[in-house]
Image: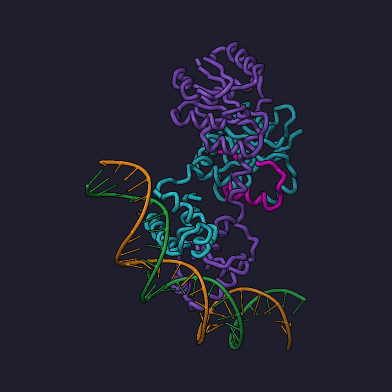
Chain colours: A purple, B cyan, C orange, D green
DNA sequence: GCCAGGATAACATATTTATGCGGTTGATTT
DNA sequence: AAATCAACCGCATAAATATGTTATCCTGGC
C-alpha cells in the first residue's frame, strides 16, 4: 500500500487527486493540505511514502516546501506538480532534491504510474520536462566556446593560467621565454576583453573555455 | 509511419528488434546494421525518423556513432540502447546529442512507446537512467560549499576578486583601507589553501563558492 | 611574390600583488 | 575576567603582473 500526502492549494484539484488516488487499488491518501505552513510536522507525523507537491502555491511555494521536507527526511519521494514547465523551476526542484517532475495536464492514469515509479526509486518526468533536463545538460558543456578565436598556443597558456601557474612556470612548462608568455597573455586579454589574470580565469570558467 | 534504422551488433537482438517493430502498426524498420562503419552514408541515404543505437558495440561504439550522425544530421532522433546504466556513458550520450537513453531489459512494448515519444520531441529515459540524470544534476550544484568557513566579510571580498576587482577597487567599494583588503585576502588564501588571486578565483568557481 | 597572422623574443616601466610583521577595537564565549 | 575572533589599519619589501614598443621567423592564402 503506497501512502501519500498531497499539497495543493486549488480545492477542486486537491479533492480530485484525493478521490482518484483513493479510488485506486494499492494507493492511499493519508491527508491533503492546502499549504506548506506545517509541512515538517505533517511529514514527520504521517510518514508517507510519496508526496505530491504543487509548485505554484501562495505563501510557501512547492520548492520551499520541498526544501523544508529535505531538512528532516531524505527518504520520502517527492513528486512535483506544476502547470508550467519553465526552466527555472525544473532546475531548482531538481537541485533541491525532487524525485520527479510532472505536468498537471498529464494527470489521469499516468499519474499512478508515475507515483509507483517514484516509490520504486525511479525519477518520473513527463516528456517535455525530460527534454528540458537533457537540454540543460548538453548546453552545459557544449563545445568549449570556440568564440574568441584564441590560437592553439593561446588556449594552452590560458589553460595554465586557470591552473594557477605564474608566468615563470608557464615559460618553463612550454619551453619558451617569459617574455613570450607575456606576449601571449597580452593577446589573450585583448581577445577576451579583460585586463588581469584573474578576470581571464573567471571568464574562462564562465564561458567554459576550460 | 515512423521509419527506423537499427544499429546493434548482436544478431539475435538485431533480428528480434526488427521483427518486433516491423510487426507493429505504424512502424517500419528501413534497415538494421551490425556496426557504425558507414553510419553517415546510411543515415543520409535512408533518412530515418528515429535511430536505435546500441552503445556497446565493437569497433565504432554507439557514442562515436552518435557523434558521427550529429555531424551531418541534427534532426533525426537517436535513442541509445544499453545493458549498462553506468554514469559515464549516460553523460557522454546526453552531451553528444542523444534524444533518449533506454536499458535493453525494458524492451518489450515500452520500447514502442519510447520511440513514439522520441519522435514527437520528448526525451524518453528508463526510470533508472532518469534517476541518474537527476543525481548528476543535483550533485553539480550542491549547496555552495560552505566548507571553508569564510567569514561574511571574506566571502564579500572573494566575490569582488571573482569579479575582477583590484585591491584598490575593493577597498573603495567596501569603504575600508587597502591594507584591510590585504588582510582579508591573506586570510582567504590560507583558508582556501591557495596563494594567488587567480587560484582563489579558480577555486571559487570550481567549488561553487560563487 | 607578397601579405597577414601566429609564435617567438627583448627591454623598459609602472602598478599590483603577496607576504612578513605589527597593532586596536568590539562582540561573543567560556 | 580572560580568551577568542572578526574586522579594522599600518609599514616594508620582494615578487609578479600589466603595458608599450619593437623585431625576427615561419606558414598559409591570395
Along the horizontal axis of the image, is A17 left or right of A77?
A: right
For the point 45% across and 31% down, the residue is A71
From the viewer's side, name the closer residue of B50 and B133: B133
The residue range painted magenta reads B60-82
Task: From this view, report whether residue B163 is shown above or below residue B149.
Answer: below
Residue A94 figure quarter: top right
B79 falls in the magenta region: yes
Q: Quadrant of the N terminus of chain B?
A: top right
From the viewer's side, name the closer residue of B109 and B179: B179
A16 falls in the magenta region: no
Residue A171 pos. (x, y %): 47, 74
- The answer, for residue B152, to whether it is visible in the render is yes
Task: From this view, report whether residue A124 is shown above or below residue B10.
Answer: above
From the viewer's side, name the closer residue of A27 and C27: C27
Residue B131 pos. (x, y %): 53, 34
Residue B184 pos. (x, y %): 42, 58
Residue A1 pos. (x, y %): 50, 15
From the viewer's side, name the closer residue of A48 and B204: B204
Along the horizontal axis of the image, is A162 left or right of A191?
A: left
- The answer, for residue A159, to whether it is visible in the render is no
For the point 59% across and 13% down, the residue is A24
For the point 73% across and 27% down, the residue is B25
- Number of numbered callouts drawn: 0
Along the horizontal axis of the image, is B205 left or right of C3?
A: left
Amino acid at each position: 500500500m503506497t501512502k501519500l500526502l498531497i499539497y495543493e492549494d486549488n480545492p477542486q484539484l486537491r479533492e480530485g487527486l484525493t478521490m482518484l488516488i483513493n479510488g485506486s487499488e494499492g494507493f492511499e491518501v493519508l491527508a491533503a493540505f492546502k499549504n506548506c505552513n506545517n509541512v515538517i510536522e505533517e511529514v514527520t507525523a504521517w510518514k508517507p511514502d510519496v508526496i505530491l507537491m504543487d509548485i505554484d502555491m501562495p505563501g510557501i511555494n512547492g520548492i520551499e516546501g520541498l526544501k523544508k521536507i529535505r531538512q528532516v527526511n531524505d527518504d520520502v519521494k517527492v513528486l512535483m506538480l506544476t502547470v508550467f514547465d519553465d526552466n527555472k523551476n525544473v532546475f531548482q526542484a531538481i537541485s533541491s532534491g525532487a524525485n520527479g517532475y510532472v505536468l498537471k495536464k498529464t494527470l489521469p492514469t499516468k499519474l499512478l504510474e508515475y507515483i509507483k515509479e517514484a516509490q520504486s526509486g525511479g525519477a518520473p518526468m513527463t516528456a517535455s520536462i525530460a527534454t528540458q533536463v537533457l537540454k540543460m545538460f548538453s548546453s552545459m558543456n557544449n563545445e568549449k566556446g570556440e568564440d574568441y578565436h584564441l590560437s592553439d598556443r593561446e588556449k594552452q597558456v590560458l589553460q595554465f593560467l586557470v591552473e594557477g601557474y605564474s608566468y615563470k612556470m608557464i615559460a618553463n612548462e612550454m619551453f619558451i621565454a617569459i617574455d613570450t608568455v607575456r606576449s601571449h597573455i597580452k593577446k589573450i586579454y585583448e581577445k577576451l576583453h579583460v585586463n588581469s589574470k584573474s578576470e581571464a580565469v573567471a571568464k574562462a570558467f564562465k564561458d567554459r573555455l576550460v
